[in-house]
């Protein structure tokens, strides 16, 4: 199999797996809410460690080695941070004071779906861009995204239920927003044939996105837990996320 064919295959299989993770939300239905919150919080800490580990162990070293790191790279990193700031602002701007129901889904749930679709589209771009860099970097980034998507999809499923969607409709809509990752991967792979050094933008953009998600979304959630024992477990799982990224160096 040629390198190009491998890149397409690995990229599409990876984003398909990530899209199927959207169905993990249904697992939450069989777990009591207080236990689910504890599990998700530990998954969040694991995810935060993995995202930051991918940035500083895989993506940043690869970027510096391949392209160096000047002002343009700093601006590309910041563009990823600014982009996700805008996406999240757009979601949180929308509110509604009518009680959510199956006949009146809450606009926040709809905005969450839209934001999730954009998020997953970017995930697709990021994963394909990582595979265009190298297979090991692609695998590491896919792993980090998967670890992030598991708690995210459980949370998204809960938001849709709270917003008035039925269980079946929530699952279907969550999956439809997830498959935009496939579209993102295809767009990145097609653009790479026409835009030389596309990864010169995609990789620093990915770094910015991952740093923003870990620092703005995940770590603040962890600080809401003040129990010493649970906080220690969070620290352990956070470090484990980093360790996973270190272990993935073994495939390079």
Image: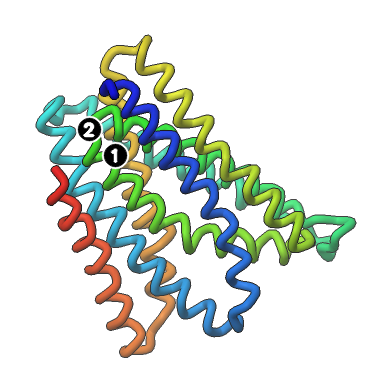
Using the rendered view, name the quadrant where residue 42 is placed: bottom left
The quadrant in which residue 206 appears is top left
Q: Secondary structure at mark 2?
A: loop
Q: Is residue 139 visible?
A: yes
**Quarter in which the C terminus is drawn:** top left
Q: What residue appears at the point 81 percent right and 63 percent down from the top-left corner?
A: 100
Q: Does 228 sit left or right of 40 as displayed?
A: left
List the residue tagged with mark 1. Answer: 138
Give the residue drawn at x 33%, y 66%: 46
Relative horizontal placement of residue 72, taking residue 171 as reference (left or right): left
Question: Is 41 on the left or on the right of 36, as rendered?
Answer: left
Q: At 41% across and 42% down in the image, what residue appears? A: 14
Q: Relative to the observer, which residue lies in front, 169 or 44?
A: 169
Disc 2 packing (10 Å; few <14; some 14–19; many ≥20): some
Residue 208 in percent (x, y) is at 32, 41
Residue nearest the observer in this picture, 101 or 251: 251
Residue appearing at x 19%, y 52% in the figure: 248
Question: What residue occupies the far right of the structure in this picture?
Answer: 103
Residue 29 % position (x, y) = 65, 73
Q: Tell me the tag on residue 134.
A: 2
Up-down relation of residue 192 to residue 30 (above or below) = above
Image disc number at residue 5 = none
Q: In the image, is residue 243 above or below residue 235?
A: above
Residue 117, picture quadrant: top right
Residue 167 lies, in percent from the top left, at 74, 63
Circles 1 and 2: CB distance less than 8 Å? yes
């Amino acid at each position: 199999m040629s390198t190009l064919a491998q890149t397409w295959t690995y990229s599409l299989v990876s984003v398909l797996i990530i899209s199927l993770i959207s169905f993990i939300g249904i697992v939450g239905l069989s777990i009591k809410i207080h236990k689910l919150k504890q599990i998700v919080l530990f998954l969040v800490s694991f995810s935060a460690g993995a995202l930051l580990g991918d940035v500083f162990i895989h993506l940043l070293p690869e970027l510096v080695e391949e392209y160096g790191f000047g002002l343009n790279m700093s601006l590309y990193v910041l563009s990823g941070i600014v982009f996700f700031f805008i996406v999240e602002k757009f979601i949180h701007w929308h509110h509604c004071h009518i009680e959510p129901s199956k006949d009146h889904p809450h606009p926040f749930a709809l905005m969450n779906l839209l934001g999730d679709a954009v998020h997953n589209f970017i995930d697709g771009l990021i994963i394909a861009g990582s595979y265009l860099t190298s297979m090991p970097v692609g695998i590491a980034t896919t792993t980090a995204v998967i670890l992030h998507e598991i708690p995210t999809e459980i949370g998204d499923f809960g938001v849709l239920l709270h917003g008035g969607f039925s269980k079946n409709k929530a699952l279907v809509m969550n999956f439809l927003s997830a498959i935009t990752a496939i579209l993102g991967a295809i767009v990145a792979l097609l653009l790479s044939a026409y835009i030389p050094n596309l990864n010169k933008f995609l990789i620093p953009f990915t770094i910015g996105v991952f740093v923003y998600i870990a620092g703005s979304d995940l770590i603040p959630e962890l600080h809401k837990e003040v129990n010493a024992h649970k906080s220690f477990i969070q620290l352990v799982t956070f470090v484990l996320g980093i360790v996973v990224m270190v272990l993935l160096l073994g495939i390079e």
